[in-house]
Image (cartoon, rainbow, N blue to C red):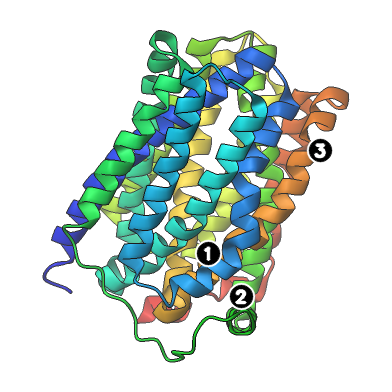
């Protein structure tokens, strides 16, 4: 593994990079289309819920199967399913059937595929590379996601300006084909399964209990999950309102929306590049806590800006992107270090589900909040809460001790 892991990751990253760029382009094109067609915070919120809820509901069950199935085949089948769903949506648009219900249903089905793909990918990484390289790999993954976040919106804005939404969706299918092809050229090992019993409903529920016990057995990890869930509850509504803040408050259009998406990607690129090149030795929990405070501060400050200060909004968005990149990489690495490889699929799936379900509650109130409180006030209030989570994290002893034993190895 120590000799071949770089070659494996290079092939894997090439496929994922092309897939992420096209997915980012299509996702942004859909956001533009919905924003300009409806201008409704509720529509954007429902679209986000459609893309999250199925993954949250089946996530814990998916994780149990991921830890029992071949992870490479799982990723291939998940990518294929998502591509088929996108193709159906593209054909429907091509035939002139452009309905919000269709978009919600297809986003929901794509979410089912993601429920298997994302945890399988995260669970496979510790089996492909030495543990000492996990933070660096997480940083490089952030670079890939960041470049995709830069190129994707630019490509999506260009595509939606030149092509119909149905044709734009075909880009996502091409990306999935690249990702699947890359997987055929690498070997992804699977951990030894200690319990080879078939995954019946009873066994699935039992495995979910085991995963929960694994998390709760480490008090610091439990607090890490809790604080992350609280932050996501606040971040999801803000993320949905970003396009509307750009359009309604800063009087922007497609170009300004593209700038904000791209600059967020630039920020994540900088953060990922820092981790990928310098590999900081500071405790990853400290990085996470600081990023909570920084991300919250950028949201709050963005809400305080007046309509003529779009440039400052761009700068704050870039800083937020850096913070998100450092947070995501550090958070993922801690889980990969603290949890046994044969349980990572279940733990990642369980986390995604428990994190998404509360955030969906936040999304359901997005329309009400935006209409009655105001978009800018929403940014201010939720930003303050996120920063307070970072402060509370520093005051939690068991969380601050997390990862120290790993760093000494």
Relative to 127, 282 lies left or right: right
CB under 8 Å between callouts 2 and 3?
no
Q: Which residue is mark 1?
A: 285
Instruction: Estimate the x, y position of residue 167 in percent, counting from the top left.
Output: 40, 20
- 92 vs 385, left or right, is left
Residue under the point 28% across and 38% down: 18
Whole-Å distance between the Cαs marked 2 and 3? 31 Å
Checking the image for residue 108, the label placed there is none
Residue 225 sits in which quadrant?
bottom right
Left or right of residue 92, residue 383 in this image:
right
What secondary structure is found at the residue carrying circle 1?
Answer: helix
Q: Quadrant of the C terminus?
A: bottom left
Disc 1 and disc 2 in contact, CB within 8 angstroms? yes
**In the picture, residue 73 is in which quadrant?**
bottom left
Instruction: Name the spot of residue 162 as percent of width and height, x first.
Output: 39, 9
| Percent of width and height locating residue 47 | 64, 34
Image vertical order of residue 42 relative to residue 38, above or below: below
Q: Earlier in the sequence, mark 2 or mark 3?
A: 2
Q: Please indicate, yes or no, whether residue 266 appears anywhere in the rendered image.
A: no
Residue bearing mark 3: 365
């Amino acid at each position: 593994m120590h000799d071949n892991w770089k070659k494996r990751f290079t092939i894997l990253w090439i496929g994922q990079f092309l897939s992420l760029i096209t997915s980012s382009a299509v996702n942004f094109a859909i956001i533009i289309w919905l924003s300009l067609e409806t201008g409704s915070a509720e529509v954007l919120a429902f679209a986000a819920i459609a893309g999250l809820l199925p993954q949250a509901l089946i996530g814990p069950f998916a994780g149990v199967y991921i830890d029992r199935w071949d992870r490479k085949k799982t990723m291939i089948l998940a990518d294929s399913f998502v591509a088929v769903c996108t193709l159906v949506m593209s054909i429907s648009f091509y035939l002139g059937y452009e309905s919000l219900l269709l978009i919600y249903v297809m986003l929901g089905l794509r979410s089912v595929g993601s429920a298997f793909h994302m945890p399988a990918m995260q669970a496979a990484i510790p089996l492909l590379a030495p543990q000492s390289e996990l933070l660096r790999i997480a940083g490089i993954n952030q670079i890939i996601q960041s470049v995709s976040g830069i190129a994707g919106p630019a490509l999506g804005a260009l595509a939606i300006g030149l092509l119909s939404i149905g044709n734009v969706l075909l880009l996502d299918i091409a990306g999935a084909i690249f990702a699947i092809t890359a997987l055929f050229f690498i070997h992804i090992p699977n951990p030894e399964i200690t319990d080879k019993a078939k995954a019946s409903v009873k066994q699935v529920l039992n495995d979910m209990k085991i995963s929960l016990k694994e998390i709760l057995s480490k008090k610091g990890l439990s607090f890490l999950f809790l604080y992350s869930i609280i932050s996501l509850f606040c971040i999801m509504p803000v993320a949905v309102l970003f396009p509307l803040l750009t359009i309604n408050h800063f009087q922007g259009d497609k170009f300004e929306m593209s700038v904000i998406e791209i600059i967020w990607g630039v920020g994540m690129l900088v953060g990922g590049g820092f981790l990928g090149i310098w590999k900081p030795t500071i405790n990853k929990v400290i990085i996470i806590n600081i990023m909570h405070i920084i991300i919250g501060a950028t949201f709050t400050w963005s809400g305080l800006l007046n309509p003529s200060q779009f440039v400052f909004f761009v700068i704050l968005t870039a800083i937020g992107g850096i913070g998100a990149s450092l947070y995501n990489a550090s958070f993922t690495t801690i889980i990969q270090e603290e949890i046994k490889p044969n349980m990572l699929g279940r733990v990642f799936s369980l986390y995604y589900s428990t994190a998404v379900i509360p955030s969906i509650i936040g999304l359901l109130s997005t329309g009400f909040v935006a209409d009655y409180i105001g978009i800018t006030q929403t940014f201010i209030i939720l930003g303050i809460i996120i920063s307070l989570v970072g402060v509370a994290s520093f005051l939690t002893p068991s969380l601050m001790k997390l990862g120290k034993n790993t760093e000494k190895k």
